[in-house]
Image (cartoon, rainbow, N blue to C red):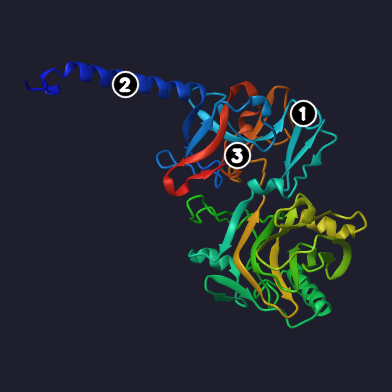
């Protein structure tokens, strides 16, 4: 007796397929409604953290189960648009109205200032380790992008099997003091026609500005009209030298960390003069991550991202006021460079120049916002939201603080396009 073929009675199979499809659709919609959803970043307001484009922008998975009460300053959140209920926004929390000590916000010198009232505003000072997620990449090496290479001065380094080898300076520590002092003086005189990195060092070929490397890897965001103070170098060190000189050369002063890994001794020079010292854990040979820079008016050196191997120093009150005034009133011009001391070359797998998020009151210089309305008060139950791309973001600087009840979820993962997949 022949076995009946499904073609003889396709209705049951068709019915089952339809039921499976309906269940799948309902399940998907339920997951999107209650657990998570995806969001296409439509604009460049969060560059370079998130790449925005109406059709090929980052596709972000939004965790709807993340608690609103667990959101704090610096967290990324997705909220409903305050004036258009059909739109959503992804921004970073700049201030929370529920924090009585930081319910007023101001934006000065690229930094966020917070306080309990407009008379008691203080610059927010972030922890260099915890703030790594907010770093903006300005340049990297090795890199195939020619323009990035033009931002870095590697002429005294050698490329060896994909690594960067920097020979030690042919001067001792005292000679290095004099060399760095002379280099800092030349930059304060703005003698920038020639080389700005001291001979034998590697670093930035020009002052670090508010530009960035796009999430797509391009450099469309590199600007040259707004210098920054809060920036630094991250070094993937494959071979440590006997000593390292890590310098932040900005208006009015050059701050240099003189670090000897074997004994952990760190001395901070200011224009070649000792101003502070500390002892970090001794570091054995091998691969290590060395980071240094300036963040929120403090200089820092961090080894391997360890809190017990961090030297962070705020500005001393007894440093000359003239230099302090010049630093905060002149246009920022910050250069970063590193050199090796001793008899062993320094071998680097990667060099990354980074800067902190840059905060300005106005969206751009050709379209200024309302003057005279800063600092801003953030009411209880509200968030003051900022876009990472301060020069092209419509955020709370324009539509003021947003009720936290507009919260929809936390961006968790970039799920596409696939070359840009990454955790947030």
Tell me how far mark 1 sits from mark 3, CA to CA: 21 Å
Q: Earlier in the sequence, mark 1 or mark 3?
A: 1
Q: Position of residue 81 (x, y in %)?
A: 54, 26
Q: Position of residue 402 (x, y in %)?
A: 63, 26
Q: Are marks 1 and 3 in contact (CB under 8 Å)?
A: no
Q: Which quarter of the rendering shows the C terminus? A: top right
Q: Relative to 64, is 115 on the left or the right?
A: right
Q: Earlier in the sequence, mark 3 or mark 2?
A: 2
Q: Relative to 84, is 247 on the left or the right?
A: right
**Farthest-out residue, right:** 318
Image mark count:
3
Disc 2, SS: helix
Q: Is residue 156 above or below residue 48?
A: below
Q: What residue would you read off at disc 2?
A: 20
**Farthest-out residue, front:** 1
Crowding around mark 1 (Cα neighbors within 10 Å: few <14, some 14 to 19, many 20+) is some
Q: Is residue 375 visible from the viewing direction of this image? A: no
Disc 1, SS: loop
Tell me how far mark 2 sits from mark 1, CA to CA: 49 Å
Q: What residue would you read off at disc 1?
A: 99
Task: Please tell me which residue is depicted at 64% across the width and 33% down the height of the picture.
Answer: 385
Q: Are marks 2 and 1 in contact (CB under 8 Å)?
A: no
Disc 3, SS: loop
Q: Is residue 356 above or below residue 158?
A: above
Task: Please tell me which residue is depicted at 79% across the width and 67% down the height of the picture.
Answer: 259
Q: Is residue 305 above or below residue 189?
A: above
Q: Earlier in the sequence, mark 2 or mark 1?
A: 2
Crowding around mark 3 (Cα neighbors within 10 Å: few <14, some 14 to 19, many 20+) is many
Task: Please tell me which residue is depicted at 67% across the width and 44% down the height of the picture.
Answer: 359
Q: Which quarter of the rendering shows the N terminus? A: top left
Q: What residue would you read off at disc 3?
A: 387
**Farthest-out residue, left:** 1
């Amino acid at each position: 007796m022949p076995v009946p073929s499904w073609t003889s009675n396709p209705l049951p199979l068709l019915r089952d397929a339809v039921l499976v499809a309906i269940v799948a659709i309902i399940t998907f919609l339920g997951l999107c409604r209650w657990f998570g959803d995806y969001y296409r970043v439509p604009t460049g307001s969060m560059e370079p953290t998130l790449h925005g484009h109406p059709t090929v922008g980052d596709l972000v998975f939004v965790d709807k189960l993340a608690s609103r009460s667990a959101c704090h300053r610096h967290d990324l959140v997705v909220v409903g648009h305050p004036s258009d209920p059909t739109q959503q926004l992804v921004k970073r929390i700049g201030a929370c109205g529920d924090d009585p000590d930081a319910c007023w916000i101001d934006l000065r010198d690229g930094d966020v200032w917070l306080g309990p009232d407009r008379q008691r505003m203080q610059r927010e000072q972030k922890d260099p380790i915890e703030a790594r997620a907010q770093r903006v990449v300005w340049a990297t090496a090795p890199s195939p992008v020619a323009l990035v290479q033009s931002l870095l001065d590697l002429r005294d380094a050698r490329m060896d099997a994909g690594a960067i080898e920097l020979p030690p300076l042919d001067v001792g520590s005292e000679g290095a003091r004099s060399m760095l002092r002379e280099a800092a003086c030349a930059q304060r005189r703005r003698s920038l026609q020639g080389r700005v990195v001291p001979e034998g060092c590697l670093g930035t070929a020009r002052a670090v500005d508010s530009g960035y490397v796009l999430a797509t890897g391009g450099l469309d965001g590199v600007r040259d009209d707004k210098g920054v103070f809060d920036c630094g170098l991250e070094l993937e060190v494959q071979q440590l030298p006997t000593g390292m000189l890590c310098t932040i050369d900005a208006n009015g002063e050059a701050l240099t960390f003189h670090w000897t890994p074997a004994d952990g001794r760190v001395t901070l020079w200011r224009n070649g003069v000792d101003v502070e010292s500390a002892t970090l854990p001794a570091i054995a040979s091998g691969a290590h991550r060395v980071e240094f820079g300036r963040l929120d008016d403090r200089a820092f050196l961090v080894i391997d991202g360890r809190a017990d191997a961090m030297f962070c120093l705020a500005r001393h009150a007894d440093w000359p006021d003239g230099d302090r005034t010049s630093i905060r009133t002149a246009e920022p011009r910050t250069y970063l460079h590193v050199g090796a001391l001793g008899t062993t070359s320094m071998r680097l797998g990667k060099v990354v120049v980074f800067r902190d998020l840059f905060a300005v009151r106005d969206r751009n210089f050709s379209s200024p916002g309302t003057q005279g309305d800063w600092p801003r008060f953030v009411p209880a139950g509200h968030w003051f939201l900022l876009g990472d791309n301060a020069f092209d973001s419509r955020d709370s600087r324009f539509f003021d603080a947003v009720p936290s009840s507009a919260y929809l979820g936390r961006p968790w993962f970039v799920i596409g396009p696939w070359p840009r997949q990454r955790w947030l």
